[in-house]
Image (spheres, rainbow, N blue to C red):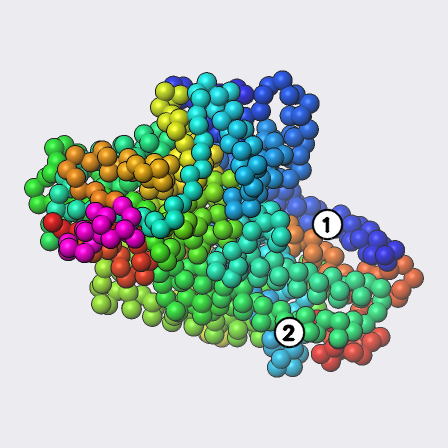
Amino acid sequence: MSDETNGPYTKVSLAEGVASSQTTRRVFLKVLGAATAATSTADAMGWEEYFQQHYKRLTDDDKRAIFARLEQQVRDRQGVDVHIRDPQPLDGVEFAYALNLQACVGCRRCEYACAQENNTSRSPEMHYIRVLQMEKGSLDVERSHTGYEGQVPQQGHYYMPVQCHHCRDAPCVRACPVNATWAEPDGIVVVDYNWCIGCRYCEAACPYFARRFNFEEPTLRASEINPEQGYLSNRLRPRGVMEKCTFCLQRTRQGLYPACLEACPTGSRKFGNLLDPNSEIRQVIETKRVYILHEEAGTNPRFYYFFG
Amino acid sequence: MADFLAFLKAAGRAVVKGSPAYYGWLAFLGAWMALGGAAMGWQLLNGLGVTNLSDQVPWGVYIANFTFMVGMAAAAVMLVIPTYIYHDDALHDVSILGELLAVSALVMCLGFIVSDLGRPDRFWHLMPIIGRFNFPQSILAWDVVVINGYLVINGYIVTYLLFTKFRGKVPEKKMYMPVLFLGVFWAIGIHTVTAFLYSGLGGRAFWHSAVLPIRFLASAFASGPSFLIIALIVVRDRMKFPVTDAALDRLRQIVAIAMILNLFLSASEIFVEMYPGTVHSASMRYLLVGLHGHHKLVPYIWTGICLDTFAAVVFVTRPLHSKQKTMIAACACAVVGVWIEKGMGLVIPGFIPSSLGEIVEYSPSFVEFSISAGVWALGGFVYTMLLKIGVPIELGEMRKPGVPNVPIGLNAFGGHHGHDDHAHGGAS
């Protein structure tokens, strides 16, 4: 397609991956696209993709075919070999996160490590983590700033990174009219990018500003693509759908830490299995002064802040 | 079946016949629809990035218009309740025009929702069985059910009444009265559910208010019948539809009470937010006086409040509303005022400041403006078409070949027509 290379960036839309030789098929699908009042991307989209069922209704065979198709699309368009997997939640695991406000210096390395790991769009730039520069003496986010620059930490301030809180009573999950977002058994709230209709009601419902919408085609250089991808997490997203932090499930379900935690130079970030009495996260919650953000919203998050 | 084909044929003939002014009106609407269609194509091609929406303000003029139009659709009951529940005949003959307005408003609601979706091609995900519907958890899922249900209810009522009269028959009560009563409750339902969409979000203090549903209904019953007053004067003057002064005055009483109640409820909300001065009042402060140097909506909302107030004063002051021109102006002010107040005046401040305290302002882009104008023109077009079909059938001018051209159930000329069935049974 003519928009394949546009400036330094390459479009990564998954919806446009039809080989140019399939002309008759494309003409046919164009008619279909018009008939179903589909978006511009639908004209080049296969039947399988358009009528793909909800994630929870897919069989293992369906998944294999879908992953192969997605991998092929990235290969055709960007020349990058990616591996899409679907790591399942582990028995006896419920993930939780804790963040040490006393130690965080506001360097935003977590924010950029997250973008790198999770293949978020570079133009327009999207970040799952937002680091708030708070005023000392106030927990009021309305007095915070995100656009601070220069050396950190700055006098009179402390820093509060915010990302998806993976709530136990998640307003976004309740809001979604088509069940395109849900909490997995290990507590991770995920989005089915192929099922989301893009109504953004979840975004209105979220009290943590944790959800991000692809208003434009997400773009990423081929060299910037992280090839190790999870189907429900960091695979390349299409335009017009919602996405968010997934606690790096492509890593954490395989025993690795989230990218944001690994990037943190101060050790402010703690992550682990809430159900394991010996885990670090349990130690933090049991021994530190822990609080949760926007407790009044009744969301019961799996993300804690602490001092110490 | 053959009758229905004849009905469609006659309807087709009716909508293409008209004066030069009628064609001018259609051309005017057509131009806006063309602009809206082109803008819609551009948006489908390029995504919602062509709007001024953002992650901070993810809903804008589309959802604002949608919310307003749900109110216009619900307002049809304000013609039905006096007629069929209080047996007050003043609005008997014109209530079908309210039902037609409801159908047109619902078409616009669906138009605005489709315009707002990031992936409108995935609409089938909302359908039963093949889709996956988060019912009853999601209030948006409820909204899909009640809006489409209301469209079916009103579509059935107007089709049944008009088609029956077209065949020269008297509509049977048992065929439409139960649906009509269902529609009354359903109308309250669509606006209540739409209010719950907002007030059910615990994380948005500006909307998280129990007053919102009743405020929605009050403003709907102010704006909808105000629009109908103008529409009735137009069909009386242009299409010779018998609209009595009693009908117009009954509507005036309704909009007067509804607008005063609306202003009272809005004032209560403002008091509760502003007087204690809690953190939660930030959105209201942004809306009314501006916040930290950001005040895009301030002149906008005060315009709305002034228009509402002016309308309320005219509605209750006899020397003012007895002049038709002043009354029409007041009705237009009520429609625009409510559109401001419960449209962008309600939707946008809910997102400002964002839940992390950021202030990102919003005003619609040219594409959003064009699509919205296009949907409005589409609604105007649908209503015009429905009136062109409905009015001659009501007047008895459009009948199946071989059926006498007499009105059925229309009482405006004091019973000078052939049928004497108007008492709550004949026409709607």
Tell me the element at label 1: loop
Q: Is residue B357 left or right of residue B389?
A: left
The residue positioned 62% from the left and 49% from the top of the image is B130
Q: Nearer the viewer, mark 1 or mark 2?
A: 2
Of B381 and B3, nearer the camera is: B3
The segment highlighted magenta reads A272-289
Q: Chain of mark 1?
A: B
The residue positioned 41% from the left and 66% from the top of the image is B212
Rendering coords of residue A72 (x, y %): 52, 24
Task: Judge whether residue B377 can be spotted in this image.
Answer: no
The residue indicated by pointer 1 is: B19
Query: Of marks 1 and 2, which one's residue comes earlier in the chain?
Result: 1
* Mark identifier at residue A300: none
In the image, is residue B1 above or below residue A22?
A: below
* Quadrant position of the N terminus of chain B in the picture: bottom right
Q: Is residue A282 one of those drawn in magenta?
A: yes
The residue positioned 22% from the left and 64% from the top of the image is B277
Rendering coords of residue B133 (x, y %): 55, 54
